[in-house]
Image (cartoon, rainbow, N blue to C red):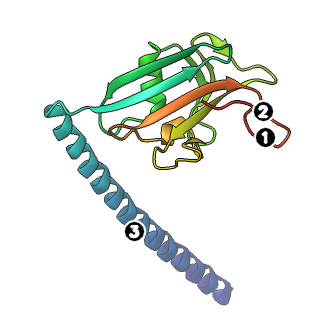
């Protein structure tokens, strides 16, 4: 009986030590995260006070021959492509959030995904002379707009290999 209670007290002491260590490490990471977030927030507030804006161009191709360019769109530094798309379309974007870390866009300008036609997001790299348009590797929330950046949304089907049937 005495041995069992000592073992129980020993196990409780070990569990308390583990909880203290884990919570200390978690607290340290939280403090560092808050510090980085605060630093970024201060920087963005300073840019906002200076009325700094980034210039971007966004193409929306509706799949029926209709292209709409939103050229010289001014956005706040730190903005992402999803927010800019919502802005240029006056909120006319249907999307679900955020199963994979970003919005899944299912409609723009009243044009909705179907079973075989979808919205694709593209980035533009002028330094790539052979293929400047590339399918985005992340969702629109994860694409930070830089000054002078160019993006496109296209509405088209996909090939048997899973690639879009169109490009901007």
Residue count near mark 2 (Cα–Cα under 10 Å), binned few <14, some 14–19, many ≥20 = some
Cα distance, mark 1 to mark 3? 46 Å
Residue that badge 1 annotates: 162
Which one is nearer the viewer's eye here, 79 or 54? 54
Give the number of the mark in front: 2 or 3: 2
Q: Say if mark 2 contacts mark 3, CB within 8 Å.
A: no
Q: Residue at x 42, y 69 (%)?
A: 25
Dividing the picture into quadrants, the one containing residue 2 is bottom right
Which one is nearer the viewer's eye here, 13 or 118? 118
Q: What numbered label is drawn on residue 59?
A: none
Cα distance, mark 2 to mark 3? 49 Å
Identify the element where label 1 is drawn: loop
- Residue at the right extreme of this rendering: 160
Identify the element where label 3 is drawn: helix
| Mark positioned earlier in the residue sequence (1 or 3) | 3
Residue 15 in picture, x, y percent from top left: 55, 74
Q: Which residue is drawn at 52% across and 49% down?
A: 128
Q: What numbered label is drawn on residue 158?
A: 2
Q: Residue at x 13, y 34 (%)?
A: 50
Residue count near mark 1 (Cα–Cα under 10 Å), binned few <14, some 14–19, many ≥20 = few
- Image height check: is 14 above or below 146? below
- Image height check: is 52 above or below 21? above
| Mark positioned earlier in the residue sequence (2 or 3) | 3
Q: In this view, does 40 lie to the left or right of 155?
A: left
Q: Say if mark 1 contacts mark 2, CB within 8 Å.
A: yes
Give the number of the mark in front: 1 or 3: 1
Q: Which residue is drawn at 34% across and 24% down?
A: 72
Residue that badge 3 annotates: 24
Q: In this view, does 1 lie to the left or right of 47?
A: right
């Amino acid at each position: 009986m005495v041995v069992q209670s000592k073992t129980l007290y020993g196990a409780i002491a070990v569990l308390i030590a583990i909880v203290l260590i884990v919570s200390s490490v978690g607290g340290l990471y939280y403090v560092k995260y808050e510090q980085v977030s605060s630093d970024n927030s201060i920087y963005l507030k300073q840019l906002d006070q200076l009325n700094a804006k980034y210039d971007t161009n966004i193409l929306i191709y509706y799949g029926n021959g209709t292209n709409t360019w939103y050229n010289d769109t001014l956005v706040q530094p730190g903005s992402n492509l999803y927010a800019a798309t919502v802005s240029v379309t006056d909120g006319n974007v249907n999307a679900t959030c955020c199963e994979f870390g970003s919005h899944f866009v299912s409609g723009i300008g009243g044009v909705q995904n179907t079973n075989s036609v979808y919205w694709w997001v593209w980035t533009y790299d002028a330094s790539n002379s052979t293929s400047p348009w590339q399918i985005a590797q992340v969702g629109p929330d994860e694409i930070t707009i830089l000054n002078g950046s160019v993006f496109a949304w296209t509405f088209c089907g996909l090939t048997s290999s899973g690639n879009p049937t169109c490009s901007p």
